[in-house]
Structures are given as structure tokens and as C-alpha cells.
Image: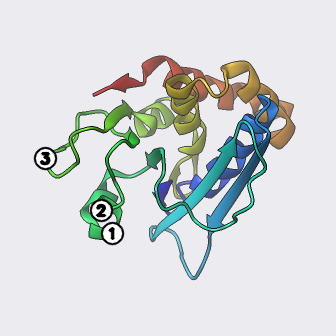
Amino acid sequence: MHCRGGQTCITASQLLAEMAFEEGFKDTIAIPIIGAERRGAPIQAFTKVSKSMQIKTYDSVVNPDYIFMFDISLLDIPRIKNSIKEGVTLIVNSPEPIDTSDFPNNIKIFLVDATGICIHKNFMHASGPILNIPMLGAFGKITGYYNLETMEKVIKNEFGENRLEKNMSVARDAYESVREM
């Protein structure tokens, strides 16, 4: 997952691991990369999931199957753009198609307007939209790794009943609106 500090991808990584485990994956692990980053700085978080075996490595992911792009301006950073390899599926927070001229030919790109959903639903914190839940809603729809019921259970356990409906509202909107480019 690529995001900027404050865009909630570290929490998204942890929630993804919990949702996959809840769906019966044998092992899951969230791997945040936390250093001296601060709000707005590019950061990464990784999640490893396995349907059949125990995960025995705890390092960052080098050849991901999926990449979340919380902020499309991060594609201007060469090391991030170069991490997009053949065969990857890219989930991009964008209301409009993105320029793919420098990407490998055989990648899949899905768009979800996570920022727009958050603004419309007032799903915000002090530094801006809370992007993790809509991005995870889109990912659930794309992959089938989990459904909205699983998201609801994990979100309720993690954040409590009083925050459940607002979280699920943005998750549903993203789940229903994600589209392949």
C-alpha cells in the first residue's frame, strides 16, 4: 500500500489482515513501514495473506499481487512507479482514469473515488479524508477475499458499534462504485 502519512494505510494493512483471517485464510500478517515519517510524507504498508500455509517471512513485499495507491501524486516518485510490475493489480484512489503510458501492458487497474466518497459522507479527520475503509471496500469487491459482512464484523470489533454505520456507509459506496479501467 502506498499512501501519505495521515491517509490511514497502516490501519488499512492491519484491517486487511484481520478481514482475511476472519474469512478463513490460514495466516495473515500486516507489516507497517514506520520511520521518521510525518503527515504528508510517502509511506508504505504491506499485508501478506495465505490461504494454505503459515507465513514465515516478515519482510516487506517485493513482488506484490495487488498495490493500493491512496494518492495518485505518489506515481510521480520513480521508486513507487517502478514498483508496478507485470501481472499486478493496481487499486487507485481516483475519480478519473490515470495515465498508464509508462506501465507494463499486462496489469489490471481499478479506480475508486475514495476521496470523493469520504468528502461526500463527511468521513474525515483533522488532516483530511479517512481513506482506509473505502479502499478496503473496493479491494473486497475486486478480489472476493472478504465481503461486506466480514468488513462489518471486523470494523465493529475494531472501532465499536458507535462508528460502525459511518464506516460501513463508505465501505458500501466504494464496494459498489469501484470499476476497472
Of the numbered discs 1 and 3, the one sitting upstream in the chain is 1
Of the numbered discs 3 and 2, the one sitting upstream in the chain is 2
- Is mark 2 in CB contact (under 8 Å) with mark 1? yes
User: Which residue is at the far bottom?
Assistant: 36
Mark 2, other Cα within 10 Å: few <14 / some 14–19 / many ≥20 = few
Residue 29 appears left or right of 86: right
In the picture of the structure, the residue carrying the numbered disc 3 is: 101
Q: Colour scheme in the image?
A: rainbow
Q: Which mark is residue 92?
A: none
Q: Is mark 3 on a helix, strand or loop?
A: loop
- Residue 5: x and y in percent read 52, 65
The Cα atoms of the two marked residues, 1 and 3, are separated by 17 Å
- Residue 90: x and y in percent read 39, 41
In the picture of the structure, the residue carrying the numbered disc 2 is: 82
Residue 123, above or below 138 = below
Q: Which of 160 and 61 is in front in this view?
A: 61
- Which quadrant of the figure contains the C terminus? top left
Q: What element carries label 2?
A: loop
Mark 1, other Cα within 10 Å: few <14 / some 14–19 / many ≥20 = few
Image quarter of residue 61: bottom right
Residue 87, above or below 144 = below
Residue 176 appears left or right of 31: left
Q: Could you tell me the amino acid type at mark 2?
A: Asn
Q: Residue 79 carries which label?
A: 1
Residue drawn at (35%, 63%) of the image: 80
The Cα atoms of the two marked residues, 2 and 1, are separated by 5 Å
- Residue 147: x and y in percent read 66, 21
Residue 94 appears left or right of 35: left
Q: Nearer the viewer, residue 7 or 80?
A: 80
- Residue 84: x and y in percent read 34, 53
- Is mark 3 in CB contact (under 8 Å) with mark 2? no
